[in-house]
Image: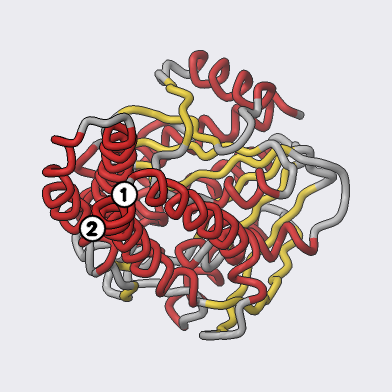
Amino acid sequence: MGGEQLRERCKALLEQIAAAPRFAGSSNESRARDLCRSQLEAAGFSCRERPFAYSRWPASWGSPVASLVQLLGTVMLAWIAARHGAATALLSLGALLSVLWLASGWVRVHGTGRIPWLRASATNLEAVRGEPAAWLVAHLDSKSQTVPMLWRIAGTVAASAVSGAAVIVALLQLAGVSSVGRMWGAIIGAAAVAALPGIICFVRDTSNGAVDNASGVVAVVLAAEELSRALLPVGVLITSAEELGLAGARAWTATRSGKAAMMVNCDTVDDNGDWYCMYTGKRPAALDAVVNATALQLGLKMTTRRLLPGILADSVAFSDAGLQSVTISRGTVRTLARIHTRGDNSAAMTAAGAADASRLLAALVREMS
């Protein structure tokens, strides 16, 4: 398929998938999943829908609660330092952070599966040809938020910086620099400003999710079609509820069987910007090397980096399950500002990035087969 023909197909499929918001479990998402299934079955894939149950609580309340607790921790540190000394404040903060670290880690990994509140259901689409050593993944669901992703990321980074500054002030106070005590008011004010985006960040359903993540779905589906013509084995996983705590990916890893596989997740591919190969946990050296070498052959400049603070992708769930996994993405700061808003629609895209991602994914599977 020629470059212009591939781009036109990407654009047409993108417009169909991103015709309406696709909240996890909704009828709009079901229609988009049926479209993907028909495309994959026509390409010779064996398709299976995998329903799962999950809790919406982590996605609905995780950000507000975490941001509020971080703010209260900074206020607590300042209050205890002023009345009981810096040593007591640091010990109290250490105890609080330890509890929060354990609690947040449990919620991140197990929350969608085990929390009993706000239970819901959704469906993953699994498509297989042959015995795949590699899986191409993209999430189908979309969401909006009361705060754009760019602001939320900025708030997360700023809150961490303010917390670090608070610890430094406490250490200086402990060392006898009494004048730093005057800084606590400013630190509390900065902590409140930094926490605000997270505190007021609530999930909504008003974004058509063109770049996040109809673009990734289009790239995966058309790459699978190309690989099918070459008779190469490959697995395709179209997840749901990625936007709600990676629930679909975690449900899939909990029930999957078979040999270990490499998971290539495609999430948010804009028409412009830098290409990123992102990971979490231990760097998946073998998979990363294949991605970068293949991108270089196609003339795509790829940068490998960890996922940005405050961002989750399905590759996190796969990495937590012990699978080598990366997320392929492309975008700019403007892309982050558009995600999870009404501005994320197909009118803002040509699908040129999705076409390039499709070529990259197909080439990756060829290299790994």
**Which residue type carries mark 1?**
Thr
**Which residue type carries mark 2?**
Pro
Q: Counting other residues with Cα less than 10 Å from the Cα at mark 2, is it few (<14), some (14-19), or many (20 or more)?
A: some
Q: Residue at x 48, y 57 (%)?
A: 96
The number of callouts visible is 2
Label 1, label 2: how many angstroms apart (C-alpha)?
A: 13 Å
Q: Residue at x 64, y 31 (%)?
A: 282
Query: Which label belongs to residue 156?
Result: 1
Kind of element beneath mark 1: helix
**Would you say residue 345 is visible in this rendering?**
no
**Would you say residue 53 is visible in this rendering?**
yes
Residue 291: percent from left, percent from top: 57, 24
Q: Which residue is mark 2?
A: 148
Tell me how the rendering is colored. Answer: secondary structure
Kind of element beneath mark 2: loop
Along the horizontal axis of the image, is 302 left or right of 47?
left
Q: Residue at x 45, y 38 (%)?
A: 307
Q: Name the image quarter holding the C terminus.
A: top right
Which label's residue is closer to the chain start, 1 or 2? Answer: 2
Residue 294: percent from left, percent from top: 56, 20
